[in-house]
Image: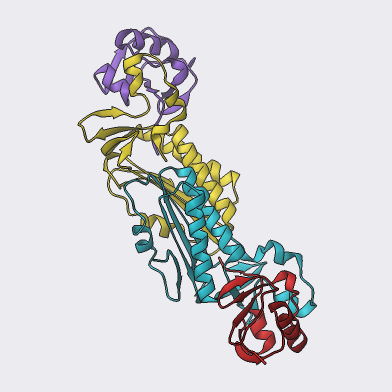
Chain colours: A yellow, B cyan, C purple, D red
Amino acid sequence: MSRFLIVDTLADISSFRESLTRSEAGGFCSFEGWVRHTNDGRSVSGIEYVAFIPLAMSEGQAILDETQARFDITTSLAMHRTGYLEVGDIAVWIGVAAPHRDAAFRACRYVIDEIKKRVPIWKREHYVDGCVEWVACHQDAESGHVPNRMDESPETRV
Amino acid sequence: MSRFLIVDTLADISSFRESLTRSEAGGFCSFEGWVRHTNDGRSVSGIEYVAFIPLAMSEGQAILDETQARFDITTSLAMHRTGYLEVGDIAVWIGVAAPHRDAAFRACRYVIDEIKKRVPIWKREHYVDGCVEWVACHQDAESGHVPNRMDESPETRV
Amino acid sequence: MPHIELEYFAQLGDVAGRRAETRETVAGTAAALYDELRKDYGFALPSERMRVAVNAVFRPWDQELHDGDHVVFIPPVSGG
Amino acid sequence: MPHIELEYFAQLGDVAGRRAETRETVAGTAAALYDELRKDYGFALPSERMRVAVNAVFRPWDQELHDGDHVVFIPPVSGG
């Protein structure tokens, strides 16, 4: 069963967490990405996430498999939302259970970092002023060059 | 209000998490310490936690205040259980909300590391074979010397 | 000529004005096909900033294309 | 002689055979009081491995003690 889930409705994170409980695990680290109310000083009303679903699922699962091989963890699960999310909604959830806390923290961090680098999901921010923009690349269509901010992805914000 | 809680009954972690939601936070990291079923190969039936409560509360709150000053975070909360816990029960819960994920992860890690170093709480493991032992120091009473394992606290296990 | 199934995500969809198309093309590789699309639609992103997936698997730019292949050009991702 | 309120946690309570006591003592500092207790109860832990709290605040070992002070010697903690 895939442990990387792409979900288009409000996610029940209690059940995700519950599914990771193991009697051999002593530490559990989770990370959530929430929709913030501002980006670069502009008021955000919501964010729309679009995924290339088959590749996002296989790449997400590959990340979790790498994580299992690389860190001394018991189990892990990740969920990414698609669709329109409002401020405060959960865009991404990651949970890692491990015998010891160091592996739990480092593995959880690895999963979110890799998701942001590799999983084909894109977000479009809806601003209170009515503008709608693809986050990482909206400057390109206008200027024809690749801005630094794409490299650093400050807009991904978490 | 204190954001470091000492609780002697099963904790409602959903409400802890809920209390940390902020529209300016984009990342949320939480850590849970769970009672494991083994320690050094011996089967554990449960763990009893005892706290010197007034000092544990003030030291715990001091850790959270330091964390707020040291990292760019929005808010944090921590809970530690006392009393008898069974395998799988949550001994400690920490949640940190921050604008960006790096601070959320690092602050959450700082809080659990400092709790383990400084907060006057002790645990006594109950083994399936009927033995009951204070975790960090049970060798001292027998041998009169301070074993290395007390420095490294491998028994704290997460 | 081979027929290629294309899907467009994020700003590529906006610029192309469509989410998907079936295209007849003589482009023999993913790289050649992307060059063709840049000319047709004016995509700003150079291939160095992109990745390409053929039949939902990441592939190198010199991947040969065959009739019926499903191709997605992947602009920088922004999930999480 | 001053009366000191003592509470014992973890292995100290087991070794002393009690959780608390009120003790008349001539010990003028926390360090002197701990030495006295080690002699009486045989506590194994040297003060270098311990901390001391007076009236529920961490204090240095040379902290002077006064009548009615509440003193807790803190063995290595194991919470979390």
Quadrant of the drawing holding the C terminus of chain D: bottom right
Picture quadrant where residue B124 is located = bottom right
Q: Position of residue D55 (x, y in %)?
A: 56, 78
Q: In the image shown, does D39 or D68 lie closer to the viewer?
A: D68
Q: Position of residue D23 (x, y in %)?
A: 65, 91
Q: In the image shown, does A107 or D28 lie closer to the viewer?
A: D28
Q: Quick check: B91 left or right of C32?
A: right
Q: Is residue A111 above or below residue B140?
A: above
Q: In the image shown, does A107 or D74 lie closer to the viewer?
A: D74
Picture quadrant where residue C30 is located = top left
Residue at x 60% of width, y 71% of height: D58
Quadrant of the drawing holding the N terminus of chain D: bottom right
Picture quadrant where residue A80 is located = top left
Q: Quick check: C14 left or right of A121?
A: left
Residue at x 52% of width, y 42% of height: A110
Q: Quick check: D24 left or right of A130?
A: right
Is any atom of residue C1 visible in this view?
no
